[in-house]
Amino acid sequence: MVYMTLSKVAFTVWPVEPASRRIGLPALNLLLCMMMPSGGLAGQSASGEVASVRFEGNEFFSDAELQRLILTKPPSCPPILAVTTCALGLDWGRSRTTLSSSTLQLDTRGLILHYRANGFRRAEVSPTAVENGDGTVSVTFRIVEGAAFRIGSINFEGDPVPPGLGIEGDLPVGRGDPMRVVLLEQMDDTLRLRLRNAGYAYADVFLNYDLPRAGDTASVFYRVELGPLTTFGPIEVTGNRLLEEEVILSRLPFREGRLFSEQAMREGQRSLYGLGIVTRALVERDTARIQIDSVMPVRVQVEEGDLHTVGAQGGFESAECLNFEGRWASRNFVGGGRTLQVRGRMSNFLAGALQATPICYQAGTGEFGQLNWLVGADFNQPSFFTQRVNLFLGLYAERQSRKNIFVRETYGLDLALNRSLAGGSLVNLRFRPQLSRLEAAEVTLCATFLACTPADIDVLSSENRLSPAGLSFSRDRTDELFNPTRGSRLLVDLEYAGGPTVSDYAYARAFVDASLYRRAGADAVFAFRLRAGRIEAGGFAGALSGEGRFRDIVPPQKRFYGGGANSVRGFAQNTLGPRTLSVGVTELLRRRGAAGEPVCSPAQVFELTCDGSALAELDLYQLRPVGGLATLEASAELRFSLSGTLLGGVAFVDVGQVWPREFDLGDLEVSPGIGLRYNTLFGPIRADLAYSFRGQEPLQVVTSQIRPFAPLSDAAPDRIDIGPKGGPRELIAWVVSEDLAILGPAVLFGDRPGLSFRRFQLHFSVGQAF
């Protein structure tokens, strides 16, 4: 018999006879509900706007956890307004609550039930509301948690569980833990699923408890009903019009006669979606065909989409301007579930015309602003020898440019084997032989590899073989593709090129990218990212002058670059990390004004002792990122809702750096910022505004070399004109050489210390940063 007192909001339970009582989980939930107090809360006559809400006496649960359980809330602002209108004392956007006795009563009951469900059966909650002098009300919930009711022992009853199944390991709760109802329900489901994955298709588990007359511990009992050991029976496939039944069966990780497993059926269902033509799949028990209890028939239902599909999409990004992509696919090419896809992509579209607008202001100009393109054909063979392995074969050609770094044209082959693993993981083994040719990369090659002569530049820019072999592991355990709110993502990528892969370049490259997502209340998400990479450079097979100087050559497209909409956002695309400056040699030799002296004399330029610092304030230098061999980046974001699911905001901090060779954590750059997200069906359209603290840095200067004028071989008009712009010509006895040169004195370049609007960087893009 159970007696209760409802004189307070709290309750007390006295089991009288017998010494303990065994109840099941439904009875325990019902008992918790029956013990809740009824009626109003005496003495709460205060009224007005809620100014503050406090909790006293809570130790097991934090204030933030309890605050999320109640409706009585203090005034609050969305995070984006907390540093703007709310900080200035304005009411716009502020959320307010008026005290309600009925709401306060519901909050009190909710807190008590929460404590009861988590093992605190003697918890007491007493709310008070005190009127302030300004007409507002301060609310306090005083909590007496009491001792937690804990699990004293865990016992198994019913059918004996065969040894070796390991169903008792890694359970949600154990001896000494509080009697938390939610975890007890998870434990029930966990045990049942483990038994059914071990071949007991009819297994069931029932949880019971012995509640003692005195003390704060209970005994938990698992009553196990195994049923017969079961195997998979006949498998029936329905709904397929184009796919052969053998193709569908090959995607299932089980066969008739194998030991039954619920997990195997779920994996088979997910695997069927790997066939592009399958739009819906269901793998379930076929109980209507059961003839023997130890044999479980299975029904596989599929729905197929169109055999041929055509798709197109577009987007924009500050660094690539407008981009478009289209594809055609045959989703059962020559049968067998094979896929053939033809695709094309354009970027830098209208970059020249829109370069002055916010949408494309980071796009390149000249050769770097011309249209980039890609065309390719991809073939995919599912179930390549085994159910979990796919064969991928692709042919492609592309033009790709990185602003002020290089323009690359490539023709190549993709050959890959993809193996799916449990838990949304994938292993990729690939080989990508290609022929690449570089353009507009003279400054990059000179500054990075000291390849400054026309012969060396031609060797590195002409068609070279790049044939990397790679191995990568990826895992995606997030709940959404575009806007994940929980879970994680991981990518580990290893790549090697050299003589064994028939590559002119030799290097070893490692890269890791990890993201984590956690909810922070009903409408906010914490997102974190960490990525790091390192390249070990090898040799180059081409014939270069001074071979020892070129032992560390890594192709520009494989080096690491930082900064941009998906990197450290306080920096423009690719501008974080090693950089150099380029300037026309005539700017160093030209007079500034009618009587002005040139920055450098011809002899200083020729001897590479010219100091071009005087030009740093004139915006005559072109910044040239050269990339590095080591990188580290980390980002933290708070993503929150501003207007339902349509409009969101973000506050973030990015940290990162790219180094020429080795890691040096003392050089890390920090970049805080805020952003807006407009959510669409194809992902969020975002705008991010970030700030950079980077100061001035000494950067090397690349320019053209000069040589003395040779009257017998040089034309007189080829002499260098050092006269001021718009003024009379002043030819000197020097001409521009075909070689490039790196000046000895570095130039201090960048923003001066202190707050500056030039330090703000604006990015527009589609999709979250990570």
Image (cartoon, helix red, strand yellow):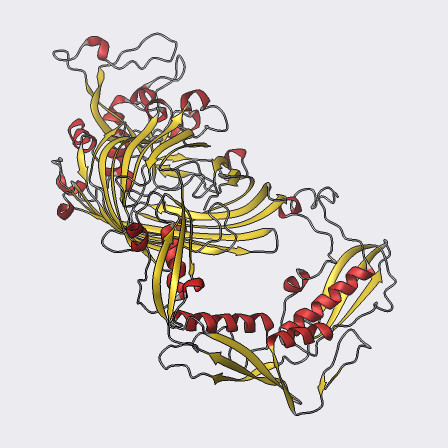
Q: Is residue 557 above or below residue 518?
A: above
User: What is the x, y in percent for residue 417?
Assistant: 25, 50
**Of 482 and 541, the residue lying toward us:** 482
Q: Is residue 660 above or below residue 128?
A: above
Q: Is residue 194 above or below residue 728?
A: below
Q: Is 748 situated left or right of 339 in this image?
A: right
Which residue of the protein is positioned furthest toward the top in this rendering? 728
Q: Quadrant of the N terminus?
A: bottom right
User: What is the x, y in percent for residue 269?
Assistant: 39, 55
Q: Which residue is pictured at 29% across the width and 13% down the height? A: 721
User: What is the x, y in percent for residue 266?
Assistant: 41, 59
Q: Which residue is pictured at 56% across the width and 46% down the height? A: 651
Q: Is 325 situated left or right of 146 in this image?
A: left
**Of 610 and 121, the residue lying toward us:** 121
Query: Can see residue 424?
Result: no
Q: Is residue 586 above or below residue 760?
A: above
Q: Is 223 situated left or right of 388 in this image?
A: right
How many numbered marks have been drawn onto this rendered protein structure? 0
- Quadrant assignment, res 707: top left
**Of 507 and 212, the residue lying toward us:** 212
Query: Can see residue 277?
Result: yes
**Of 568 and 548, the residue lying toward us:** 568
Q: Which residue is pictured at 87% across the width and 68% down the height? A: 43
Q: Is 338 situated left or right of 727 in this image?
A: left
User: What is the x, y in percent for residue 230?
Assistant: 37, 72
